[in-house]
Amino acid sequence: MLGIEGCCIHDGYLAFPNFPEALLSQRFFVYLLHTLKDHAEASARGLAQLNLNTDLVRSFPFGLPPLAEQQRIVAKVDELMALCDRLEAQLQERDTRQAALARAVLARFADAPTPANLELLFHDSFTITPADLRKTILTLAVQGHLVPQDPTDEPSDILLKRLDQQRHRFAEAYKFRATAPAPIDEEATPFQLPQNWKWARLTSLFNVVTDGDHLPPPKSDDGIAFLTIGNITTGKLDFSETRFVSEEYFQDIAAFRRPCSGDILYTVVGATYGRPALVDSDRPFCVQRHIAILKPATSIDVSFLVAVLKSPLVYDQATASTTGTAQPTIPLGALRNFLVPVPPLAEQRRIVAKVDQLMVLVDQWEAQLAATRTTADHLLSALVAELTTT
């Protein structure tokens, strides 16, 4: 075993002023350094930035075959690396084609959710990810393709009138001015709705769309939980690690800006914008201004609203509305005027039941894929260990 003698570190780079070419092939030595990566990481020092000093590098041990064998090794490695490059290029091309095919099949199924097109989703020629399948289910839900329509259902225009009355009564009760939804150009809507459905602005479905207090709250060691974006990005409320505000501060917040059970929170700032979370707790809490508070009217299905907010239709509008680059922000005015489809209330409930049923199946499928992937990883690790055992 030899060490790396005569080397030095200059400007963060390893240098060899007197490389022993008579004994060592430079290309062989480059390949050799690649094999020492784990040893180098284990030997490095420092906390914020790991580094190696010259003495540590010089102490690295390695086996040195004769020069002629080094050259044969280099030739074989070069040959194998060329094959790996070709294989990588072919795999990338295959993945690109499979991704394009998967997108086309998902789009076809979304346009025409027939049994034949459903069967295509599970063709052996490509892989549909659980995340993409969830998006497709939500797209079908908001387009009216997930469950059949019932002509005896109360039409949505009657529902929207009732929601408008509730919204104005809520504003009068809490003494604020109800937001007037922007007009809708039916010719500019994203797709055609089934009969008895209507397009509406998001604000028409909620008693109020507001956000948390814009002033930084005074910190407290205990009291009322103060949730930030990190507490809701999973789609569930997480009270495990929260800040607190005093009871006095909480009581000073206008009642219609305090979240309560049945409300929906929606992230409007940062990389995780556009994520809804249903408030399913009676625990009092407040939120930062980076979270919108959507209080549904009583005559609409809250679970349907969550599904709509999770759908690609709404997320695409959220993305198009963002301002800023370092910290994308969805303005409340834009959020209130997102276009959303409104089916009859009875159909909303049928849609929610079907979405829940399908999402359970997708969750089970995803768990099976994860188990299969874990098994494959274990087999690969065992194979590599067997091939590298001498």
Image: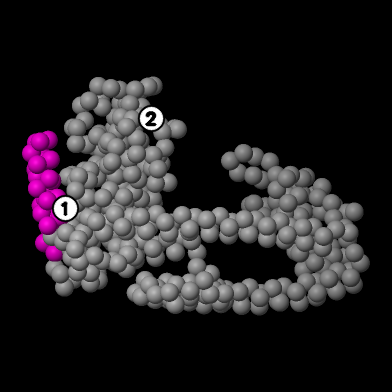
Q: How is the image coloured?
A: one colour
Q: Is residue 294 above or below residue 281?
A: below
Q: Please tell me whether residue 120 belongs to the stretch shown in magenta.
A: no
**Label 1 secondary element:** helix
Number of other residues with Cα within 10 Å of mark 2, as a class: few under 14, some 14 to 19, many 20 or more: some
Residue beneath the point at 64% across and 51% down: 12
Quote the CA–CA distance across marks 1 and 2. Answer: 33 Å
Picture coordinates of residue 262 (x, y %)?
Answer: 28, 41
- The circle on residue 11 is none
Give whichever of discs 1 and 2 has the lower sequence position: 1
- The circle on residue 243 is 2
Q: Please tell me whether residue 176 belongs to the stretch shown in magenta.
A: yes
**224 on left or right of 299:** right
Q: Could you tell me what secondary structure mostly forms the magenta stretch?
A: helix
Q: Quadrant of the N terminus?
A: bottom right
Chain part drawn in magenta: 158-184
* Residue 70 visible: yes
Within the image, what quadrant is residue 141 found in?
A: bottom left
**57 on left or right of 286:** right
* Residue 193 visible: no
Picture coordinates of residue 367 (x, y %)?
Answer: 56, 55
Residue beneath the point at 71% across and 77% down: 83
Residue beneath the point at 82% across and 47% down: 59
Q: What's the amino acid at mark 2?
A: Arg
Q: What's the amino acid at mark 1?
A: Ser
The residue singled out by tag 1 in the image is 204
Residue beneath the point at 12% across and 57% down: 158
